[in-house]
Image: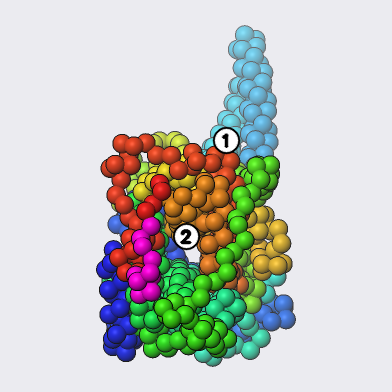
Amino acid sequence: MAELLYRLGRTAARRARAVVAAWFAVLVAVGVAFAVFGGTLASSFSIPDTPTGEVTDLLASELPSAAGGTGTIVFSTTDGSAFTADQQAAISEQIAAASDVEGVEGVIDPFASQAQLDGQRQQVEDGRAQVEAARTRLDDGQAQLDAGAAQLEQGAAQLDAAQAQLDAARQQAEAAGAGAAANAQLAAQQAQLDAQRAQLDAQQAAVAANQATIDAGRAELEAQEPQLDTAAALLEMSAEIRLVSADGSAAVTPVTFTEAAMDLTQETKDDLQAAFTVEPIEGVDVDFSAEIAGGVPELLGVGEVIGVVVAGVVLVVMLGTFVAAGLPILTALVGVGIGALGAMSLSGVVEMVSVTPILGVMLGLAVGIDYSLFIINRHRRQLKQGYDVHESIGLANGTSGNAVVFAGATVLIALLALNITGIPFLGLMGTVGAFCVLVAVLIAVTMTPALLALIGPRVLSRKERARLAAAEATAGADGLVPAVAPAKPLRAMSTPAAVLRALVAIGALVVVALPAMELRLGLPDGSSEPHDSTQYRAYSTIDERFGEGQNGTLLVVATLPEAPAEGQETAVQAEIGRQVFEQDDVVAVAPIGTSEDGTTVAFQVIPAEGPTSESTEDLVHTLRALTLDGGVEIGVAGQASGNIDVSDTLADSLPTYLAVVVGLSLVILVIVFRSLFVPVVATLGFILSFFAALGGVVAIYQWGWLAGVFGVENPGPVLNFLPTILVGILFGLAMDYQLFLGSGMREAYAHGAPARIAVVQGLRAGRSVVTAAAIIMIAVFGGFIFSHAAMIRPIGFALAFGVLVDAFVVRMVLVPALMHLVGDKAWWLPRWLDRILPDVDVEGAALERRHPHEHEAAHVEEPTPTR
């Protein structure tokens, strides 16, 4: 590989203009490809085969109207007063127009819906009042009827007593032989009693009829009461769901789309927003939730530009000339342009989230500058030693370029390994990042030599060129440039100092890593957005006027074993809703739709807290584990549920991915350093730096420490895919630093230096370039800490802090201290393993022996290695 890169560098130097023109042609080509084929980048995340995905698929087949993506539009009065009738009418007109936007399934008018909901509540209340009034009337009638019946029974008793007296008198008259006159009087009395009894029978029949009427009335009330109770129960469970705030100063307009959130086009979002913003309503503010307003973040914002400027300052300080300092930045920008535009040109056919090209930009800038710097730094050193420009370019490309290719390969492998997680969007992030790194490597070993050839000796400062010319003028007759005075003899660090350094480094890393034990994963919600953004205003308005739970609405779907009996649909909805409503942290439940066959019922469920809260996460898991009567199965979907599933899946995949990366680290480092101890301590150091970086993220972005310094306005869960991304990227960069420092130690040891002296020698040889490279990476990644996009900021911090810890604590303090403590054992390797391992010659030592400097070739014999 080193020989190939040597020839490639010499060829690029000879045909410099053609190489530079070719790369710029590629940049133009991918720009055209992006303009022609570029599609929409999604602002939401999804993973197939999750519980949310399964419920969404069920809804798509059984209840399509509830399967599309959703968003929210929030209206509020500027002065906090209630909406006027004119304002309500104007908003309703805009809503009607927005309903015709392509891709929009429906836009709900909050005022009409709230009025309808209030009307339903009033109808139920009126119905209950009517039932109570009717019951009171029936009770009063029953009381009167019971009193009349009692009087009739008393009259019947009196008639029976009179009849008995009359019968006794008749018997006495018959016994005494009463005359006709007495019998006539008795007959008259009997007739009077018969008339009274007939009247009593008629009254009793009337009482019976009234009783039947009352019984019928009661039966009717009993038939109406369950319906009223069901309606009242549903309304009571949904009492906290409002579309217009209680004070009338804010209104929420739910929007449903024909496509899922991941498939929603930017054009639909823009057209929907335009429907409400082209003609503003006086006295009314309109804001949009992240599902509608969340677009593609800027690839390069102010913070990112500042990071590049800082990197430029570091380059100027290190290289001493603006021309040399500009080369790494130029090559990195060309590489970033090709990588990012090339990736986004595929967004029309590949489902790509908006943060994907941003990650490519971050990596492309950082490694692009560093890789070019490594080659330029080697070239400058060789020029100072008297090398010819083209000779130096080829040798720098074959030595440092070889190390760049190997370092880039480790980053590529780590990023491509993200595909083993089985998470499509994460695998695509890794692939795009790997593509940007690949472009950076190719540009470093082709365009950098070409540019170095074009600027020639100007890669050195004027003072350096003058010093070199003076040295050449005083060269001896043999043409050799006078040698530089030998440096002071190196001294190994003391053992107590090494122990102290190791203990302090490990202790500091462990302390910083402790917050990682409390890691919670999630996706940023509207509260994490900048306070001047429409997403934040929409979120905060809903939080203040309607309750924070309405920002994290859940879609609960009940699957019934069979359709309810005719007329029992509402009762079944109420019973399912009741069981859901009884769960902790459920504020409101409302049915929103039923499938045609009646076996699938969808509910809107409002949790007590926001979408990223622990209580909402627990509620989702509780609802999914809920066992309802009658074999009813419960599923949960919605944006909040989907984010929880993504976080759970990522958390489950992280240990596997970390194990793969750690194993890969050990194998690569064993091959490079031909040692067992160095790979082990280097890998353990990577693990420490990873958890330290994660601990810093938790402390700042989850707990809110130093929130003001880093612009964390609302602490919350850590970005769910950040730990996995951090593993891949930090691993690759850590291997870069270990390579450039450890290879120098290995080379010194192989040439006969004592093990502990070799540690110091390698550290001194590589620390300046590693320091500069690390500072550049920290500056570039740090520029993203103040990005306008909430998802980008923690990624930038994690990478910047991870590089800081790994480069300056692990690679320059911990690993050298541990290698000093073990001495020669640091380079021990079993003979059988040494025989089967390939010789990768990362630093290109063999190349240097094959292509020695012309003066060295004439006067210096190739040394024989002592080890």
| Label 2 element class | helix
Query: Which residue: 32% across, 89% down?
Result: 17
Q: Is residue 525 above or below residue 107?
A: above
Query: For the residue carrying disc 2, how many other residues have a C-alpha within 10 Å: few (<14), some (14-19), or many (20+)?
Result: many
**Residue 572: in sight, yes or no?**
no
| Label 1 element class | helix
List x then y, in percent, for residue 688: 56, 47
> Mark 2 highlights which residue?
740
> Mark 1 highlights which residue?
204
Query: Which residue: 51% across, 90% down?
Result: 278
Q: Magenta segment, which residues?
A: 853-863
Query: Nearest the camera: 168 or 436?
Result: 436
**Residue 196: in sight, yes or no?**
yes
Q: In screen coordinates, is 251 left or right of 409?
A: right
Query: Which residue: 66% across, 69% down?
Result: 711
Q: In screen coordinates, is 853 left or right of 485?
A: left
